[in-house]
Structure formats: C-alpha cells, structure tokens
Image (tube, rainbow, N blue to C red):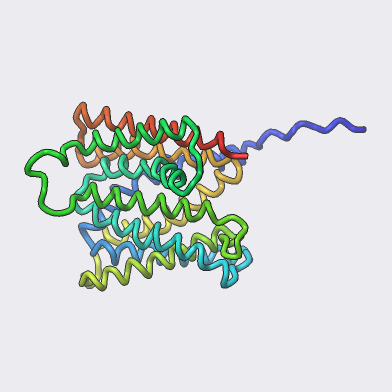
C-alpha cells in the first residue's frame, strides 16, 4: 500500500489571507467602539444601528446570491432571527446607548466579558464547566467588578450608567451565542450558508433597532454630515460585512481558538487607540482590572477547547 503523504503546508497566499483576517478581527474590529461612540454624537443611536446593519445585511445577502449559496428555508429562518434580535436588535442598541456616556476603552474591556458570560449561561442551562472555565468566569467577574468600583461610591446614583448598558449588551451577546451554539440538528437549526445566516441576523436586528428608535422618538437629522456617512460606511461595510467574512475564514481555516482570540486582543488595542486618539487614560486600579478581565477571557477561551470533541 502506498504510504499516505503528509498534509501539504499552507501556501504563502493562504498564510497571507490568514494574517489579513487576523488583522481585521484584531485591529480593525478594535476601532468599532471609537467609531460607534463618534457616530452616536452625530446621529440618533438606534436609527444609526438600524441603518448600519441594514447596509451590512444587503451587502452579505448580495454576496451570497452572487456566489449562488443556497437560501435558507422557512424553518431555518427562526434561529438566525432570534440571534439577530438578541445580538443586534437588543445588544448593539444597548451598546450604542451606553456609548453616549461610557468611554470607548472601558466599553471594549466590559464587552470582552462575553465569552465569560457565555460560559456562565451554559452552566446555568445544565452544561458542566471544567476548572479552567470556572476559574476564567471568576476572574472575569472580579475584573469587571474592580473596573466599575467607582459605581459603588456615594453620589454615583442618578439614572442608568453607560457601563451598565454596555454590560447589558454583553449579556445579550452571550445569550445569542448560547442560542446559536444550541442549534444542534433541530429543524430550526442555523442556515448552511454563513452569509445568509449573518444577513438574516443583521436584517432582523436592524428592523428591531429601527422600531426602537421610532418608539423613543428619534428623528433623522435631515442630511447627515460627511463624518456620519464615513462612520456608517466603516461600521457597516468594513467592520460588519468584512469583519464577519474574516472571522468565518479563521474559523474554517485556523479553528475556533484562533478565531475567538479577538476577545482578548480587542480590549488592549481599543484602549491604546482611545489613548492615542482621544487621550483616554486609566489609573492603576483600572489597569489591574483590565489585566484580570483579559486573564479571565484568555482562560475561558483556552479552557473551552478542552470540551470540544
């Protein structure tokens, strides 16, 4: 019998695509907090979320049609619609509202708790966590508490804080991740085409955010300034459509561990960008909290690999 040959080493072109995808999810995704924080000063927050994700949905579905990817059936629309409701309709809307008062750097650190919250929610639904996941969850909770220690000081009351809205957004994102993970082989599983699944999610989320903006009485301010259109184009076409494509490429080629690495790379990059561009700085306590949160996220992501078949 012929001896089976060793797997071919990835070509230089494939390695280039992997590094390009990593640059998108590591660096470009880190700018989303700054861009969104700037956008909500120019446009109504929920209507901006609706327009951003509607544009991204049209782009993704258009690419799926051009690539002749199979459209999902009616039964396969329920799951991505629910995920889009949680992730975009509620999650991104709460994040936009929170960024009206919360700083982009702190928001990036708080949102990094999504893998930790996902592990906690999976444990609440009956899935057993290994020691690494439990340790990561404990570290993450301690780091988030330390980062927001100033909220417990006297005189900090008086309405919901932006950090609380960002944390609520992270909870919605974790619920969406659990819902997508538990799809299984049910009749309502996610569509086979990742582009169609993302397009449906973004379209449903955009509809919910737009409805929320109308309920809040948000009014579109005529013809927005050029800065608003630039931020919308960056958020919808580069970060949503392009970032999603890069993330799925990493999942398919490099595995989920590499793809999930954005969760602990984005916060320090976002903090560095916020310091360079807006002068946002952290004191010693906040820097220690950031380190604890990142350690918890890294521990959670690495420990999650143990439970995979």
Residue nearest the viewer, comparing 306 with 45 = 306
Q: Where is 250 relative to 179, above or below?
A: above
Q: Is residue 172 left or right of residue 193?
A: left
Q: Position of residue 217 (x, y in %)?
A: 20, 72
Position of the N terminus, as image quadrant, is top right
Q: Position of residue 22 (x, y in %)?
A: 49, 40
Q: Residue at x 49, y 65 (%)?
A: 200
Residue toward you, 113 or 179: 179
Q: Is residue 187 left or right of residue 246?
A: right
The residue that appears at 48% across and 55% down in the rendered structure is 179
- In the image, residue 289 sits, relative to residue 253, either above or below, namely above
- Which quarter of the rendering shows the C terminus? top right
- Residue 230 position within the rendered picture, expressed as x and y whole percent measured from the top left: 32, 58
Give the quadrant of residue 65.
bottom right
Residue drawn at x 21%, y 41% as measured from the top left: 278
Q: Quadrant of residue 45?
A: bottom left
Percent from the top left, x then y, of residue 88? 38, 59
Instruction: Report the label total.
Output: 0
Q: Seen in the image, is 127 located left or right of residue 173?
A: right
Residue situated furthest right in the rendering = 1
């Amino acid at each position: 019998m012929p001896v089976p040959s060793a797997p071919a080493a990835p070509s230089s072109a494939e390695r280039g695509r992997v590094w390009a995808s990593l640059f998108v999810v590591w660096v470009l995704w880190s700018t989303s907090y700054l861009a969104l924080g700037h956008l909500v000063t120019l446009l109504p927050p929920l209507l901006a979320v609706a327009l951003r994700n509607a544009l991204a949905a049209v782009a993704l579905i258009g690419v799926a049609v051009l690539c002749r990817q199979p459209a999902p059936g009616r039964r396969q629309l329920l799951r991505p619609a629910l995920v889009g409701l949680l992730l975009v309709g509620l999650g991104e809307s709460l994040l936009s509202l929170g960024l009206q008062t919360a700083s982009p750097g702190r928001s990036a650190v708080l949102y990094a708790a999504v893998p930790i919250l996902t592990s906690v929610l999976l444990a609440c639904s009956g899935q057993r966590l290994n020691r690494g996941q439990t340790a990561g969850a404990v570290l993450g909770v301690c780091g988030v508490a330390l980062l927001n220690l100033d909220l417990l000081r006297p005189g900090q009351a008086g309405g919901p804080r932006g950090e609380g809205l960002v944390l609520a957004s992270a909870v919605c994102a974790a619920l969406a991740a659990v819902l997508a993970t538990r799809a299984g082989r049910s009749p309502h599983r996610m569509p086979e085409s990742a582009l169609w699944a993302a397009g449906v999610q973004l379209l449903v989320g955009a509809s919910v955010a737009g409805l929320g903006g109308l309920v809040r009485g948000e009014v579109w301010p005529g013809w927005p300034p050029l800065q608003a259109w630039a931020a919308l184009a960056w958020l919808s076409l580069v970060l949503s459509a392009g970032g999603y494509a890069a993330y799925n490429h990493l999942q398919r080629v490099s595995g989920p561990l590499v793809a999930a690495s954005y969760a602990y790379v984005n916060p320090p990059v976002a903090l560095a960008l916020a310091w360079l561009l807006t002068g946002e700085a952290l004191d010693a306590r906040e820097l220690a909290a950031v380190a604890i949160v990142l350690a918890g996220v890294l521990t959670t992501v690495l420990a999650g690999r143990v439970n995979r078949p």
